[in-house]
Image (spheres, rainbow, N blue to C red):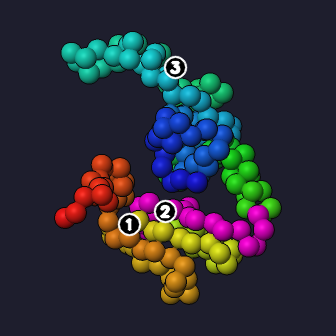
Amino acid sequence: MTSNVDALFARGGFAPDRVFTPQGDYGRYQCATPCIPSTWDSRPLITRLLAAYDPATGAVTDPSALPRCPNCGGEVEINVRIGPEFVDTPYLPAGRRLQQWLGTAHVDTRLLILEFGAGFNTPGVVRWPGEHLTRHFPHARLVRVNSTHPETPADLSGRTLPVPVEAGDLLDALTLPHLTPDPTETP
């Protein structure tokens, strides 16, 4: 589960159908109204738009290249959760699979929740659900990596690890080569 809308998990090798992205995806468009609960891949729209783009003037030379809803002909927008118009249909199956997996997990399941940068812009998407899962599974642990809001609830004391650094800095530190002393050498 991620609040990221940049598809980096899929581009990084994760199976797209196993990543729950309840906030949407920059790579998809939807009707701005929306007249139907559908979304469309942005690549064909962008390709058509770029073909009609004049870099010298910054203008689109063919107005028919501007993306329109294929159903009603209205304006389209990027498919990310901005307001009540958001179309979440493409993301519901992954959310159901996650809920089903969690629903079938035994209460004694050892679960490690790694949370990177989830703050209070949309805490109901990742932050609070992670806390809820930690409460629900007695053997669950929550690692919260967040430079501005690493705090964890008092009732989860001893089961959380707040890490007050930027996620990128932590990941860099974990992936940098570290010198390992040779145990056969004396200092």
Q: Amino acid at mark 3?
A: Pro
Q: Residue visible at 66% across and 68% down?
A: 110
Q: Amino acid at mark 2?
A: Glu
Please state the extent of the stretch shown in magenta in the rendering. 105-126
Q: Residue visible at 72% across and 45% down?
A: 93
The percent position of residue 34, horizontal first and vertical second, equals: 62, 41
Vertical relation: 79 (above or below) 111 = above
The percent position of residue 87, horizontal first and vertical second, equals: 62, 45
Looking at the image, residue 63 sits to the left or right of residue 14; the answer is left
| Residue position for label 2 | 115
Res. 111 image quadrant: bottom right
Labels 2 and 1 touching (C-beta < 8 A): yes
Q: Amino acid at mark 1?
A: Asn
Mark 3 or mark 2: which is in front? Answer: 2
Q: Nearer the viewer, residue 38 or 141?
A: 141
Q: Decide: few, some or many residues near mark 1? Use Cα within 10 Å; few <14, some 14-19, many ≥20.
A: some
| Residue position for label 1 | 146
Q: Residue visible at 66% across and 36% down?
A: 38
Instruction: Tell me the quadrant of the picture where the N terminus can be found.
Output: bottom right
